Amino acid sequence: FFPSEREATMALRMITEKAMGLVSKQYQAALGASLAQTGLRYEDLLNEGERDIAEAMTLADPELITGRTRRIKRALDLGFKRKNLQDYAPDMELDIYKSELYETVEKIRARDQEYALLNAHNK
């Protein structure tokens, strides 16, 4: 009994998804520990140079942008001093994976994709 090409592809996909799930959990834990040392959130790592992220930041609440800027400046300062956030604020609770901006980024990407599909006939 030899599996069909479709069955082999499905089996390979299942194995790959399980392996990626394990690796992504380990990576997320390592990244979370690194972000906790500096007091950054995962969203603070988003590249402002990308058009959709820049647009989402212009639409975001000014308090969100101020908080992001302060966290980045604090992380730069801690890195320069070679210190840890826990040295200065040991009881500070961090919500590393809190998502406030990414929902807007996803909406902008969906809008752009829809626009591209609607105008595909012009090419």
Image (cartoon, helix red, strand yellow):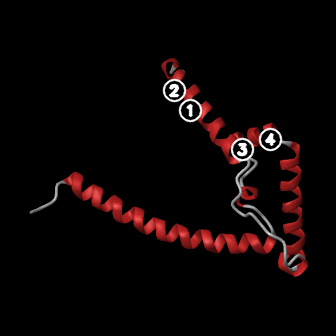
The reply to whether dot 3 and dot 4 touch (C-beta < 8 Å) is: no
Please tell me whether residue 75 is drawn above or below residue 44 in the rendered image: below
Q: Residue furthest top?
A: 122
Q: Could you tell me if residue 84 is visible in this image?
A: no
Dot 2: within a 10 Å radius of its alpha carbon, few (fewer than 14), some, or many (20 or more) residues?
Answer: few
The earlier-in-sequence mark between 2 and 3 is 3
- Camera-near label (1 vs 4) is 4
Q: CA distance from mark 4 to mark 2?
A: 26 Å
The reply to whether dot 1 and dot 4 touch (C-beta < 8 Å) is: no
Residue at screen point 75% across, 38% down = 55
The reply to whether dot 2 and dot 1 touch (C-beta < 8 Å) is: yes
Going by the numbered disc 4, the residue's amino acid type is Ala
- Camera-near label (4 vs 2) is 4
The earlier-in-sequence mark between 3 and 4 is 3
Q: CA distance from mark 3 to mark 4?
A: 10 Å
Q: CA distance from mark 1 to mark 4?
A: 21 Å
Q: Quadrant of the N terminus?
A: bottom left
Residue at screen point 88% across, 43% down = 62
The residue that label 4 is drawn on is 60
Dot 3: within a 10 Å radius of its alpha carbon, few (fewer than 14), some, or many (20 or more) residues?
Answer: many
Residue at screen point 46% across, 65% down = 20
Give me the disc on residue 113: 1
Dot 1: within a 10 Å radius of its alpha carbon, few (fewer than 14), some, or many (20 or more) residues?
Answer: few
- Depth check: 51 or 102 in front? 102
The earlier-in-sequence mark between 3 and 1 is 3
- Measured from the top left, where is residue 109 in percent x and y? 62, 37
- Depth check: 49 or 8 in front? 8
The residue that label 2 is drawn on is 117
The residue that label 3 is drawn on is 53
The reply to whether dot 3 and dot 1 touch (C-beta < 8 Å) is: no
